[in-house]
Image (tube, rainbow, N blue to C red):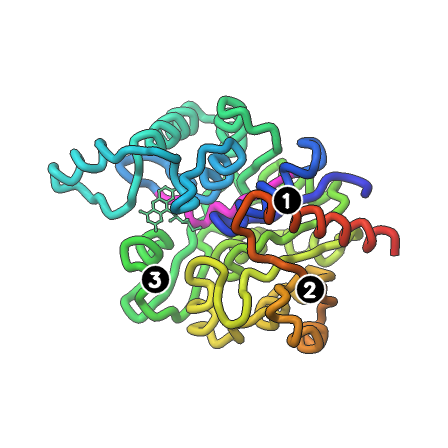
Amino acid sequence: MNGPVLALAGGVGGAKLALGLSHVLPPRQLVIVANTGDDDVFHGLHVSPDLDTLMYTLAGLANPATGWGVVGDTFGVLDMLKRYGADSWFGLGDRDLATHIERTRLLREGRTLSEVTRYLCGKLGVKTALAPMSDDPVRTMVETDQGTLAFQDYFVKHRCEPSLRNVRFAGASKAQASPAFQNALNTAGAVVYCPSNPVVSIGPILALPGVMEHLKEFRGPMVAISPIVGDHALRGPAAKMLLELGEEVSCVGVARRLAGICDVLVVDRQDAHRVADVRAAGMDVEVMDTIMETDADKERLARELLQLVETLVES
Ligand code: FO1
């Protein structure tokens, strides 16, 4: 392959494949670009959940029970905030807070989110390149039957219960893709869409000016792993969101979203009977075991994907 793999990812689901890819590719052959539409400010601190989930996962520090946050973290600060009557619905652990304190300090000194991410990753020993999709603020806003909610309000505070009407990405039209993302779009040998929520994880990345155009004209192979298996999301609210947006909750619904910017959709063995429907949606299809429970599963899927990419390069 001529150039690194550009992996587009959201949080926990995306991080599983990102970890697998990082185990089977040398660091210079992989660039992971993370959604930052979920970012928000809590207690005056800039929190970047998807970047942190990816960073902690790659550093071997992620909480295995949740997929987000730091393993073995304690919640002393949050408990004290609760006593003061401060907002405490967003579960920030004590060690995790150190990341947000340091990130916020560096941002206030004038560093970009890309620079801060590189710095924090370096300190945690992460060798793979991890970059935010943009250094400019983009905020996912969820329009629901209970009004418009910032993404974390919808996702954590309201547990995704309000019914969705629309999703928009505030700031996206004025934001620029980060330097690492722009560079990867120009130099990557392949693009991998990690199995992340197509609406709120991949959606904000695609909403950045110029990204769709770049992907439409991208010369190398582009492959995606469906985050929907059967009629269920592997994780999180993707199925509920697609349903409420009037889209089909299946790998075919995912294919319809990515048609034109992806060559092959990898679907799970359980969805082998939908192969013709995915093709009819405008995408080629491969069947694999996509459910990643162990690190061995993550590496196996990453290897199979890279083999697929190599065969696409040769054809
Ligand atoms: N998810 C939750 O369901 N509840 C939480 O309290 C929570 C806290 C949290 C703190 C830091 C962080 O980086 C992530 C956190 N997440 C929490 C996960 C986060 O809301 C989601 O994973 C993503 O934004 C969706 O990809």
Instruction: Kindly identify the amino acid type of the residue bearing the numbered disc 3.
Output: Cys
Residue 33 among those drawn in magenta: yes
- Seen in the image, is 78 located left or right of residue 199? left
Q: Which residue is mark 2?
A: 287
- Seen in the image, is 267 located left or right of residue 236? right
Residue 185: x %, y % from top left: 69, 45
227 relative to 110, above or below: below
Task: Tell me if label 3 and label 2 are in contact, CB under 8 Å.
Answer: no
Q: Which residue is mark 3?
A: 160
Q: Name the one closer to the observer, 54 or 133.
A: 54
Q: Name the one closer to the observer, 296 or 120.
A: 296
Q: Name the one closer to the observer, 269 or 146.
A: 269
Residue 299, label in figure: 1
Q: Nearer the viewer, mark 3 or mark 2?
A: 2
Q: Residue at (77%, 50%) from the top-left corner?
A: 307
306 relative to 81, above or below: below
Q: Considering the numbered disc 3 on the image, is that residue within a helix, a strand or a loop?
A: loop
67 relative to 231, above or below: above
Q: Earlier in the sequence, mark 2 or mark 1?
A: 2
Q: Quadrant of residue 25?
A: top right
Q: Residue at (72%, 73%) from the top-left corner?
A: 279
Residue 237: x %, y % from top left: 42, 62
The 10 Å Cα crowd at callout 1, few under 14, some 14 to 19, many 20 or more, is many
Q: Considering the numbered disc 1 on the image, is that residue within a helix, a strand or a loop?
A: helix
Q: Residue at (33%, 32%) from the top-left corner?
A: 97
**The magenta stretch spans which residues?**
31-40
294 relative to 154, above or below: above
